[in-house]
Amino acid sequence: MNWKLVIRILMLTAILFGFSACETISKLDIPGLPLGSTTNELDESTIISGLKEALEVGARKAVDFLSVYNGFFGNPELKILLPEEFDKIDSTLRKIGFSRQMDEFEETMNHAAEEACALAVDIFIDAINHMSFSDAWNILNGPDDAATRYLESHYRMNLYDEFFPVVKNTMDNVGLTQMYKTILTTYNSLPLVEKREYDLDVYITNKALDALFLIVEREEKAIRTDPAARITDLLKKVFG
């Protein structure tokens, strides 16, 4: 076994999840060192699996948190507002008696994101399982949210490509696509207005991914600092 690599990964894990490197390394039986009563042999695969499982736990909790009814709409921090490009459409249609329709449109937009997130967990887990740790030193020297940021920077585009059709299909299922077409048709039929088009499915996909990564980041930090957040045997073995 490449013990230098093991120690490097242990140091990475220690910094990512709030333990001292020395304390973490003491859990490993290294040839040439006496076996201690507190040591449990952890190989490279176990350490890497622990880091991936931490992200998987975060992803599952993020999906559970966001996919409930009003997970977006009932949360002021995460509520998806109408895009800025809709400001003119929104204000114009409200002036001619479409306030209720615009309110329903914004609410349905959030419910579409909630339903789409319910189907996101497998997409996230697949990305996590394909993570490479060639950039381990960048994570090691990074901030407290380094693992989440690594996942986002390396896999967001892949996640977007997988998640986009889910959002698009959900928009159809909850009636948002038809509402959107009706609103645009109504606005564009008004005299003296500049005709508008907008890729709402792109907007909702990105907003939903932003929220998912935000909750994953918070769960990652919790696993580092709170033993109660280490809810699996592997997390307890590696990080506790």
Image (spheres, rainbow, N blue to C red):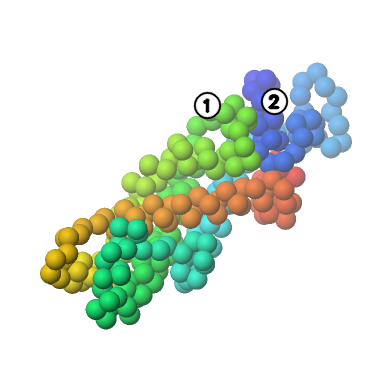
Q: Position of residue 229 (x, y in %)?
A: 68, 54
Q: Residue at x 43, y 52 (%)?
A: 209
Q: Residue at x 21, y 58 (%)?
A: 197
Q: Position of residue 53 (x, y in %)?
A: 59, 45
User: Is 79 placed above or below 230 here?
Assistant: below
Q: Residue at x 45, y 36 (%)?
A: 154
Residue 12 visible to the viewer? yes
Q: Residue at x 42, y 43 (%)?
A: 156
Pick the quarter of the image with the C terminus: top right
Q: CA distance from mark 2 to mark 1?
A: 15 Å
Q: Residues within 10 Å of mark 2 (few under 14, many from 20)?
A: some
Residue closest to the eye, 48 or 29 = 48
Residue at the front extreme?
Answer: 192
Amino acid under disc 1: Ser
Residue closest to the eye, 26 or 134 = 134
Pick the quarter of the image with the N terminus: top right
Q: Position of residue 148 (x, y in %)?
A: 54, 43
Residue 43 visible to the viewer? no
Q: Which residue is mark 1?
A: 134
Amino acid under disc 2: Ile
Rendered image: mark on residue 7: 2
Figure disc tally: 2
- Report whether 122 appears left or right of 99: right
Residue closest to the eye, 179 or 18 = 179
- Report whether 112 appears left or right of 218: left
Q: Earlier in the sequence, mark 2 or mark 1?
A: 2
Question: Tag 2's secondary structure?
Answer: helix
Question: Tag 1's secondary structure?
Answer: loop
Q: Residues within 10 Å of mark 1 (few under 14, many from 20)?
A: few
User: Is 177 placed above or below 148 here?
Assistant: below
Residue 200: name its quadrant: bottom left
